Image (cartoon, coloured by chain):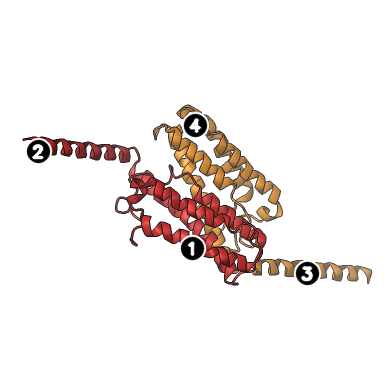
Chain colours: A orange, B red
Amino acid sequence: MRLFTNKAFTLSLVGLAATATVAMAASHSQKGLEDAVKARHAQMQMVGYHTGMLGAIAKGEAEFDAQIVSAAAANLAALATMERATLWIEGSEQGAVEGSRAKAEIWSDPDGFAAKFGDLEKAALAFEGAADAAAVGAAMGALGGSCKGCHETYRGPKN
Amino acid sequence: MRLFTNKAFTLSLVGLAATATVAMAASHSQKGLEDAVKARHAQMQMVGYHTGMLGAIAKGEAEFDAQIVSAAAANLAALATMERATLWIEGSEQGAVEGSRAKAEIWSDPDGFAAKFGDLEKAALAFEGAADAAAVGAAMGALGGSCKGCHETYRGPKN
């Protein structure tokens, strides 16, 4: 009987937890969650755009331009330090919202996730003051590594 | 003959200016200009997303949440202060690149254009510390006005 009681108590806790999760998700409409995913994709689009711009300079496909390098670095840092509260809304993970590739670990390990954006910011700021294409090339490794480091842990497979 | 000489000189200057413009545009490939337009649209998408989020709180469609309001304000300010050198590339105006609605005035009047982003930043920062939905509502006018003020002058008609 004691086992049964414990089991009932455990089931009751699970039920409470499930209710709490539903209530939290319900505070954002499905439309709100879809919009959050689209805004994150816009953020990532801009990260990719600026990374591509720096990569083209590193590879000699685009002319070295100190102003462009500095602007790209600043914009990447601004994108990396965007407040996550409006963008990474709980309930917008892969499976729950079409197009999302966000893994549940984003919400179960917020400090680890924040650290990845810190890596991106640090990698971006390393481009500041680059004097030539070679310096841009030298900084590309850490930038690419910061993208990869986050995607490996917090991004799910292609939809 | 003097008139003719002056006219020839003027035409020659026009020719030089045209050559310079072509050379400047040529430093960015058509693909590069198209990517810049897409990145600007991503920037505007994020501005619209955060504005909509604040608007929903102002209208009582979403619950007031001080953390969300503050995060939205900070992200709008970050978007407003993005470096324009990588995004508003000369040669990517409406007509020159598919999907672009950027007017030539963006490049002929860069100070005026910069001032509009300054208006957006100021309007965004006014949301910081809003204590309730009414305070959010009170700040919406200036935010909407900053969108409208820039679009009226620097955005062309729908494509």
Image x and y of residue A114, in percent: 66, 47
Point 32% across, 50% down: residue: B104
- Dot 2 falls on a residue whose secondary structure is helix
Disc number lying in front (3 or 4): 4
**Residue A109 visible in the snapshot:** yes
Is B95 on the left or on the right of B116, as rendered?
Answer: left
Q: Are marks 3 and 2 on the same chain?
A: no
Q: Are marks 1 and 2 on the same chain?
A: yes
Is B92 on the left or on the right of A89, as rendered?
Answer: left
- For the residues marked 4 and 2, what is the alpha-carbon distance in whole angstroms? 52 Å
- Dot 1 falls on a residue whose secondary structure is helix
Label pair 1/3, CB-CB below 8 angstroms: no
> Alpha-carbon neighbours of circle 1 within 10 Å: few (<14), some, or many (≥20)?
some
Q: Quadrant of the N terminus of chain A?
A: bottom right
- For the residues marked 1 and 3, what is the alpha-carbon distance in whole angstroms? 42 Å
Image x and y of residue A92, in percent: 61, 61
Q: Is residue B158 above or below residue B88?
A: below
Residue tagged by mark 3? A16
N-terminal of the two: label 1 or label 2?
A: 2
Q: Amino acid at mark 4?
A: Val
Q: Chain of mark 2?
A: B
